[in-house]
Amino acid sequence: MATTTATITLASSDMMDNTISLSNTATLTNQGNDTGMTKTTGLARQTFASTSNVVLLDSGASGGTQTQQAVTGGKVYIKNINDRGDGTKYVTVKIDAAEIGRLYGGDWTFFPWEGGAGNDIEVDPSDATETTLEYIVFHE
């Protein structure tokens, strides 16, 4: 059985009266059971030099950067590997045109994704200078 785990660690935060440190690990399993996920797109990088909306992960046949066959119970990792810069350069991440967040230089996200018609993951760079994203999908 394949076992893939994802771990997030906040080493410290002084946003409150007391500093906190927390860590959490999840085993990536198929939907509705404890069988480990066995498929991945592999880690990839894509560079954009335009402000045009781009389908990064396509769950159907519309020709995105990575085409998936109806991803079920997937987990997606996307990172904007550019320098942070002045804070005006970011990439908007969308699912079916609905904004789920912005990734500034060095920011990353990890979220569940149910592929299928209309659930493409799109990115929209804030400016036309070169932006590079790193991404991978783990799925059933």
Image: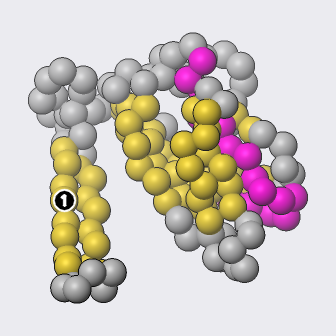
The answer to whether one can see residue 119 in this image is yes
Is 34 displayed left or right of 75 in the figure? left
The answer to if 119 sits in the magenta stretch is: yes
Up-down: is 122 above or below 84? above
Find numbered disc 1 in the image and state the secondary structure of the residue it sits on.
strand
Quadrant of the image occupied by residue 130: bottom right
Is 36 displayed left or right of 46 in the figure? left
Q: Residue at x 51, y 16 (%)?
A: 116
Residue 40's x, y, as percent?
41, 37
Up-down: is 120 above or below 46? above
Q: Which span is picked out in magenta?
A: 118-132
The answer to whether one can see residue 44 in this image is no
Q: Residue at x 83, y 59 (%)?
A: 127
Is 53 displayed left or right of 76 in the figure? right
Residue 133's x, y, as percent?
63, 56
Residue underneath mark 1: 24
Which quadrant does the C terminus fall into? Answer: top left
Query: Looking at the image, which is closer to me, 13 or 10?
Result: 13
Up-down: is 86 above or below 38? below
Residue 67's x, y, as percent?
60, 26
Query: Looking at the image, which is closer to me, 67 or 1?
Result: 67
Which quadrant does the N terminus fall into? Answer: top left
